[in-house]
Amino acid sequence: MKKLLFTAVVLCIAGLTFAQQAGFKRTLLQTNDLSISDKVVVQAIAEFGPGVAAGRHTHPGEEIGYVMEGQIEIKIDGQPSQLIPAGKTFFIPKGLVHDGINTTSGTSKVLATYVVEKGKPVATPAP
């Protein structure tokens, strides 16, 4: 059981650290199993420098975000862009290709909560 939990945490961390752009940082806060079969919840803080993007990616589950500081533009393929200012939330459904971009001249911070499939990377780069 400990080995399985360790593997899940390593995969989550690997998924959170993919394509770390200059000026973009994700800090893992927690990873926990859920009562829903084969699902885990992962929480992280994403910090974006001025004008910095996270990079196009997908998740094997949902992303629920809260902009703590600054403003983020959320671009989901096939949908209009959304500007999310500090104090507001956003939701990204499973598997959709998306990106988040800081549209301010200062740092933007997001509290991201992912409800994803156990054993899969939290995020996967998209072309």
Image (cartoon, rainbow, N blue to C red):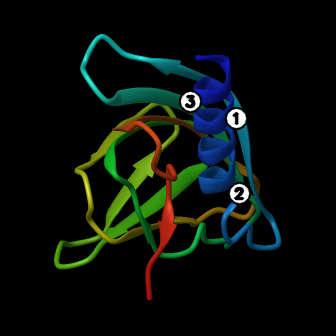
- Give x and y (percent) for residue 26: 71, 48
Give the mark nearer the N terminus: 2 vs 3.
Answer: 2
Query: Which amino acid, mark 2?
Result: Thr
How far apart, in angstroms, are the residues tagged by discs 2 and 1?
9 Å
Does 74 sit above or below residue 10? below
- Residue bearing the label numbered 3: 43
Query: Which amino acid, mark 3?
Result: Gln
Q: Residue at x 67, y 53 (%)?
A: 14
Does 62 sit above or below residue 103? above
- Give x and y (percent) for residue 48: 70, 57
- Give whichever of 15, 98 is nearer the camera: 15
Q: 60 left or right of 70?
A: left
Does 89 sit above or below residue 30? below
SS of the residue at dot 3? strand
SS of the residue at dot 2? helix
- Give whichever of 19, 46 is nearer the camera: 19
Neighbour tally class for label 3: few under 14, some 14-19, many 20 plus, Cα within 10 Å: many
